[in-house]
Amino acid sequence: MKNVYDILQERGFIEQVTHEEQVRDLLGKESVTFYIGFDPTADSLHVGHFVQLMVMAHMQRAGHRPIALIGGGTAMVGDPSGRTDMRQMLTQEQINKNAQAFKKQFSRFIDFSNGKALMVNNADWLLHLEYIPFLREVGVHFSVNRMLTAECFKSRMERGLSFLEFNYMLMQSYDFLELYRKENCKLQLGGNDQWSNILGGVELIRRSESASAYGMTFTLLTTSEGKKMGKTQSGAIWLDPEKTSPYEFYQYWRNVDDADVKKCLALLTFLPMEEVNRLGSLEGAEINRAKEILAYEVTKLVHGKEEAKKADQAAKSLFAKGKRCSDAPSTEVSKEEFIKGMDILTLLQKARLISSRGEGRRLIQQGGIYINDERVNDLNLSITLEDFHDGTLMIRKGKKVYHQIKLS
């Protein structure tokens, strides 16, 4: 059976490893318990977490045991990695609610039955620590001079770094130590922005337990231009269907740039690499077929086969001239609001198709907004009940974004 390290490397996941040869050997000869931490700072996982979920799934398929660590304790401090300012402080109630939402989403990717995987919350140990004993046991092993060279702290020194956030590395390192002691967890995985924190845990286990532990980081989901994926004008792409509908989710992947198709297929699907390479090499109009496969496969993983089929059919129906589809995203607006007419910019804002009225004006001036397949040229266009057909009005933004307005 192929070593999972080679699978992850071939698919383009791996960025950095603390001890490459030892980690590969370890993953090839025994079932390894590993963990990835997720701070519940929102009530849903988003596309940025997707790479980590796929890594956990690949590892479990190869016989290794995942620990999904919910950062109920660390979320009360906030990770400074990749931040230019201090994260908003959350209440314990908000954190617990978010953690419950995460648990439900993890189960789509990881099998937690019969001890095949664990889900733990670091609030169970971090919130009960005593300050002086913690400093004596853990703080003694950390050099402030060395910590300040870590990228997560160095980038914040000019803007200001709170002492609260400065403790984050110690807390994440202690998580690794705790899981090593309780579950024989030898490997911590994470996004490449977690490298400094992971190194802290590896070193703490070496010093405290005189034992070997390892770390490995993975590529962040970025475009070929280096920009983070998973953001649209209306906000983040979430894994929760209530926050990002399966159709909108499908459409996001259907519309990725040609240059990003192969990378996304490799990282975000389980298609064999032979197929990934074949689809990724398509050019011209043929690359659209690869994008449809990408969108279907990713939507199937996150929302299930039925929702993926519905989204796929909806997208194809909308591109067939003259057809409408009930699976396109929609917004309900009271019938009364259209009796005297609603201006086009207000309607676009209600549908969350624009982030500002200025953006709406630019789109209309550029010919990028259509109502019921007719281009909008008038910035002051008023939408009335006469524009609705069977209680529905279709807006098209650009070539590919469709949105229904339904009367309520």
Image (cartoon, rainbow, N blue to C red):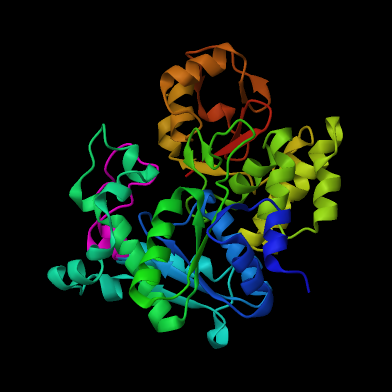
Q: Residue at horizontal 79%, vertical 36%?
A: 320
Q: Is residue 221 above or below residue 176?
A: above
**Could you say where residue 83 lies in the image, as x and y percent from the top left?**
35, 41
Q: Is residue 300 above or below residue 157?
A: below
Magenta stretch holds residue 217: no
* Residue 299: quarter of image: bottom right
Looking at the image, which is closer to me, 152 or 223? 152
| Residue 23 in the figure: left or right of residue 89 | right
| Residue 103 in the figure: left or right of residue 388 | left
Q: Is residue 298 above or below residue 229?
A: below
Q: Quadrant of the N terminus?
A: bottom right
| Residue 202 in the figure: left or right of residue 85 | right
Q: For the stretch drawn in magenta, what is the main secondary structure?
A: loop
Residue furthest to the bottom in view is 114
Magenta residues, as a range?
73-95
Looking at the image, which is closer to me, 144 or 340? 144
Looking at the image, which is closer to me, 264 or 135? 135
**Could you say where residue 88 lies in the image, as x and y percent from the top left?**
26, 47
Magenta stretch holds residue 84: yes
**Could you say where residue 253 lies in the image, as x and y percent from the top left?**
66, 43
